[in-house]
Image (spheres, rainbow, N blue to C red):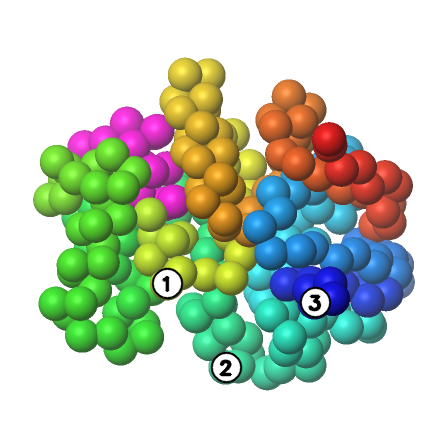
């Protein structure tokens, strides 16, 4: 018996009203993602990539259609419920890292657990273990401004993992990095995928997209192609 998909978008539309104009950023998108997949969402500017990531990340609701995450229909959840889903079931990796400059490495990694009310000693232990896992075990007390871009993104990845999320959503995770640091971050994502993590990544870079096992290309808010590699 086949497993239920971890993510299911069913005829999802997201409409924005801009004055008298109506923009369908997503236009009847239907997609499913299985646990353990590594998927790249690609397409030209304005094709709907960011909107899709916002919907998948429970940062925005569909105007129409259904979004089922881990067996839950979250399409009509209110803001508080969506916030709870983000904190417990999703991990985010941002192009600009989005670290809190006043906090240390280990404190930045702890942030999602703080909002879930995890006891301090437990969250500190979990965050330190993840810092070590991403190669920053000797940087626990450093602030973001004391780190390279690649190291800051490693903190971001550790933070995304700390709540053991159902899926990791990555928005151009190497966009602000030099080629060497970018390659290291992509190798780390490959490693996480190899350990069974489900990763959905937005990228404009064909070379990066081809590293993933599946590429979904959008155009004008619709799925133009959905290709699984070997």
Element under disc 3: loop
Q: Is the N terminus in the top left, top right, bottom left or bottom right quadrant?
A: bottom right
Contact (Cβ within 8 Å) of mark 2 with mark 3? no
What residue is shown with label 2?
A: 80
How far is mark 2 from mark 3, CA to CA? 26 Å
Element under disc 1: loop
In the picture, measured across the screen, residue 61 lies left or right of residue 106, that is: right
Q: Is residue 147 magenta?
A: yes
Classified by dominant secondary structure, the portion drawn in magenta counts as helix
Element under disc 2: helix
The residue segment tinted magenta is 146-157
Q: Residue at x 44, y 36 (%)?
A: 191
Q: Quadrant of residue 70?
A: bottom right
Question: Residue 59: which numbered mark, if any?
Answer: none
What residue is shown with label 1?
A: 163
Q: Residue at x 77, y 34 (%)?
A: 44
Residue 100 visible (yes or no): no
Mark positioned earlier in the residue sequence (2 or 1): 2
Q: In this rendering, which labeled residue sits more in front, label 2 or label 1?
A: 1
Relative depth, front residue between 213 and 10: 213
Characterize the local packing of mark 2: few (<14), some (14-19) or many (20 or more) Cα atoms within 10 angstroms: few
Find the residue positioned furthest to the front: 1
Mark positioned earlier in the residue sequence (3 or 1): 3
Residue 154 is situated, as x and y percent measured from the top left of the image, at: 33, 38
Q: Residue at x 55, y 43 (%)?
A: 171
Q: Is the C terminus in the top left, top right, bottom left or bottom right quadrant?
A: top right
What residue is shown with label 3?
A: 4
């Amino acid at each position: 018996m086949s497993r239920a998909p971890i993510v299911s978008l069913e005829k999802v539309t997201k409409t924005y009203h801009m004055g008298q104009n109506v923009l369908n950023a997503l236009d009847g998108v239907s997609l499913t993602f299985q646990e353990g997949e590594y998927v790249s969402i690609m397409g030209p500017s304005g094709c709907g990539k960011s909107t899709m990531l916002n919907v998948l990340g429970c940062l925005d609701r569909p105007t129409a259609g259904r979004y089922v995450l881990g067996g839950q229909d979250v399409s009509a959840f209110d803001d508080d419920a969506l916030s709870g889903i983000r904190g417990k079931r999703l991990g985010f990796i941002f192009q600009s890292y989005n670290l809190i400059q006043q906090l240390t490495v280990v404190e930045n990694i702890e942030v999602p657990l703080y909002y879930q009310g995890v006891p301090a000693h437990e969250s500190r232990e979990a965050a330190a273990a993840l810092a070590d896992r991403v190669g920053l075990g000797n940087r626990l007390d450093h602030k973001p401004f004391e780190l390279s871009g690649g190291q800051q993104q490693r903190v971001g990845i550790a933070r995304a993992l700390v709540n053991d999320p159902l899926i990791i959503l990555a928005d151009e995770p190497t966009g602000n990095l030099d080629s060497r640091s970018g390659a290291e971050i992509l190798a780390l994502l490959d490693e996480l995928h190899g350990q069974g993590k489900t990763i959905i990544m937005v990228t404009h870079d064909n070379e990066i997209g081809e590293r993933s096992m599946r590429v979904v290309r959008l155009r004008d808010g619709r799925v133009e192609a959905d290709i699984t590699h070997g």
